Amino acid sequence: MSIFASLVAHLADLLQPLFHTSATAAAIVVFTALVRLAVHPLSRAAARGQKAKARLSPQIAELRTKHAENPERMQKAVMELHAKEQVSPLSGCLPSLLQLPAFFLMYHLFSSSRIGGEPNGLLTHTLFAAPLGDRWTDALAHGGVFGGAGTVYAVLFAVVVAVATFNYRRTKRQMAATPLPQAGTPGMGAMTKIMPLLSFATLFTVAVVPLAAALYVVTTTTWTAVERAFLYRDMPKAGALATAA
């Protein structure tokens, strides 16, 4: 983690002439963009995989009808079809899985009072009036909702709501254009109702994690919304599934 802290510190030094006391916060945003840029080829591959699976939807529907009385045989037949067409059922999960280590490193970096036996100096850095190591509850305790730190969180919440609303409307349109099959799939009806609302869960994450990790979450969520809108623009069903993932 000390290597990771050094990387953030070096980025902050480079950005300091432009962002001054908020240079470390800017470094987190830049780091997030670099992580997402590195993962972007996998996101493109995931989009291709989703499109390939959509192309196989009619054949999968036939297999479900054919093996309706034998779920195990149906599952095996679907897997064989995926293997034959070289489609990975897990391709859409890879970008999210590869981002998790970066998020947890960020969380621990700004949650630890000491790094390598030394005081964690990054916790004293700020985004305007809000320390990067503090949480929303700290902002409320020092100045309230409309205090300096509270205002920073209000802006972050506004960005999250805007992105979540964009995802919600887009997912609803996509699912209306291409309804997901519900017959024979337990829980599918409930999932299709909940799916468009999942983006709003980010509000809870931003509220409970340190501000530095919240910046990472807001930045990567915004990137994800824009990226998926582009990658899945010509594929309603896969786009809806990916947006909610």
Image (tube, grey):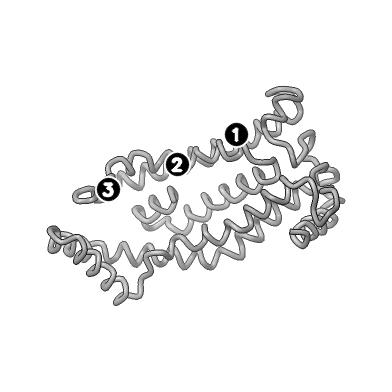
Which residue is tagged 3? Answer: 179
Q: Secondary structure at mark 1?
A: helix
Q: Give how far across and how far down residue 175 sits, in percent.
A: 33, 46
Q: 72 and 131: which one is in front?
A: 72
Q: Secondary structure at mark 2?
A: helix
Q: CA distance from mark 2 to mark 3?
A: 18 Å
Q: Amino acid at mark 2?
A: Leu
The label number, if any, that marks residue 158 in the structure image: 1
Q: Disc 3 or 1, which lies upstream in sequence?
A: 1
The label number, if any, that marks residue 229 in the structure image: none
Looking at the image, is 7 positioned above or below residue 107?
below
Instruction: Please tell me how crowded label 1 is: few (under 14), some (14-19), or many (20+) other residues with Cα within 10 Å.
Output: few
197 vs 126, left or right, is left
Marker count (numbered): 3
Q: Which residue is depicted at the point 36% across and 71% down?
A: 87
Q: Which residue is depicted at the point 19% across and 66% down?
A: 73
Q: Disc 1 or 2, which lies upstream in sequence?
A: 1
Q: 130 and 120: which one is in front?
A: 120
Q: Give how far across and how far down residue 182 sits, in percent.
A: 23, 48
The quarter holding residue 232 reads bottom left
Q: CA distance from mark 3 to mark 1?
A: 30 Å
Looking at the image, is 187 positioned above or below residue 139?
below
The label number, if any, that marks residue 198 in the structure image: 2
